[in-house]
Every structure is written in C-alpha cells, then in structure tokens.
Amino acid sequence: MSIVVTGATGNLGRLVVEGLLEQVPADRITAVVRSAEKGARFEALGVRTVIADYNVPESFEGVFTAGDRVLLISSSEMTADRVAQHRVVIDAAGSAAVALLAYTSAAGGHESPLTEAHRRTEKVLAESGLPYVLLRNNWYSEIFVDGLATVVEQGVLVRAAGDGRIASATRADYAAGAVAVLTGEGHENRAYELGGDTAWNFPEFTAELGRQTGREIVYTPVTAEAYTDLLVGAGMPELYASILAGADASFASGELAGTSGELARLIGRRTTPIADTVAAALKR
C-alpha cells in the first residue's frame, strides 16, 4: 500500500509530500510527476516517483495498486477540459481498486465558473463507486500577496470584492489537512469545507499592510466590469481577467466567508492568519 500524490511538484503537492515524509516512511509515498527532472528531488529523499500526465490517459496505467490512498490534486490548466483530466485519474484509480481517493475541490457555490469543473468532478467521483473524500479548499492566502511590492509602492489596491470576506488559509495549512486525511481513518465519503479560522476583507487587508509597512495603503473597490477592463489593459488575457473578476464577485457576495473550523480540527492547530502571510511576503 502506498500513498500516491498527483501533481506532486506543484506548490501544494510539494508541501503534501514533505508533510507525508514526517508521518510515513519514504518508500510508502509515490509522487506523480511530469518528468524525471521534476521528480529527482523526491527520489533523492527515497520517495518513489512515476511519470504521468493528466492529458495522457495511458500514462496512468499501473500507477496505482489495490489499497493505495490517492490524492488527486486538481488541474490548474484553466483552458483545458479539467473534468476529463480528472476522470483519467479517477478511472485509473477505480481500475486498481484503491482504498481512498481524496480530491482537492473548491469552496464556493455551484454556479461559480471557478467551481463548475470541481462540482462536475465531484459528481464523477460520487458515481465511480470509489471510497472518496472531498477537500473543498477555500482560497490560498499566498495568492493575495502576489505583487505586494507594487501595491506598497503605489499606495493603492484596486479590487472588485467590495467589503466581502474571504476565509483563506495558506497552502501549508491545506497541505497539512490533506496529510491528515491521507494518514488518518474514517474520512471515506465525506466532504470537508476547508478554510481559515478568520475571514478577512480587503479594507482590513490594506489596513494590515499599512500597519506593517508604515505606509498609507488605500483600498479602491470597483465593479467587476471595471476590474476586468483594468486587468486586460495591463496585459492580462481576457479569459483570466474575467476569472479573477468573477472570483472577486464571489468574495463580494460573501460566498467564501464561511469559517467551518474543519481545517483547524483536521490539522490540530489554528490556521495561519492573513497578517502572517503578509509579513512573510514583505520579508521576501
């Protein structure tokens, strides 16, 4: 029996493998990677690596064995058919009769464009007959501190999120939650709503950024349409700009504000406050 992590060299997958190494012997961990070069780091630690690609179904033949516990990290290819990619892994896991398939889904309503592929994947999983667990992760806190230096320099943050709150957590928090599920018992056929212990909004975010930098940072809320135009004008492809604006609309509606406490219970500690993520970003 092995614990198999797909997408193991991504930002989340790497942290999951590192967390597993603290809990189980390296030879019980399998990292699914896209190339030998990407897997070299894990192999040096004694982790088994296999090369497979969500877009190449035959590459998953023989990856799983009966009794394995699998973490399917959702595809980040927004222009691809992500449900079809996920089905490749689910079908291979089903053929091998794995003991558990955990899927990194997303928090939020069923109508959100960002969550549509996740909900459709959840349906595929439910119909597969596999024992599964849904890890409905809220947003990663790290996403909100990308480009922080520019915000500090300009003294303004423009978003389309209004005063809506976001119960984000760090990738390390979510990775720890995945490790707890993969190494624990009693998680079959459950759905966990995972996120931070405290929801925050952008007025609070800019106030915290100002406090830590000693600079005045102004939050300027705009409409989703204006935000899309702003991003496109800055050179972002319209598809991605509309996705980000749609996400902000979800924040504004309060859709991502839920604080279930389930992530903290899984990992046995409080989640990382957004202020800590801001501080870490400013030190880089």
Image (tube, rainbow, N blue to C red):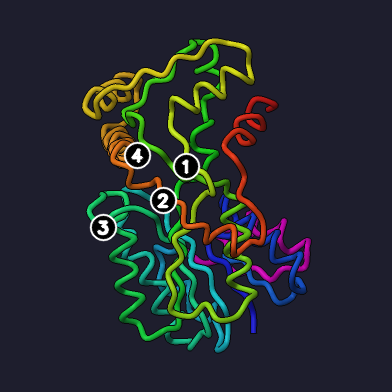
SS at mark 1 in the image: loop
| As drawn, 150 above or below 188 | above
SS at mark 4 in the image: helix
| As drawn, 252 above or below 255 | above
Cα distance in 3D space between marks 2 and 1: 7 Å
- The residue singled out by tag 1 in the image is 199
How many neighbours does mark 1 have within 10 angstroms: few (below 14), some (14-19), or many (20 or more)? some
Marked residue nearer the N-terminal end (1 or 3)? 3
Marked residue nearer the N-terminal end (3 or 4)? 3
In the depicted view, which residue is nearer to us: 253 or 147? Answer: 253
Tell me whether circle 1 and circle 3 mark residues in contact (CB < 8 Å): no
SS at mark 2 in the image: loop
On screen, residue 60 versus residue 220, left or right, reads right
In the depicted view, which residue is nearer to us: 208 or 284? Answer: 208
- The residue singled out by tag 2 in the image is 258
Marked residue nearer the N-terminal end (2 or 3)? 3
Marked residue nearer the N-terminal end (2 or 1)? 1
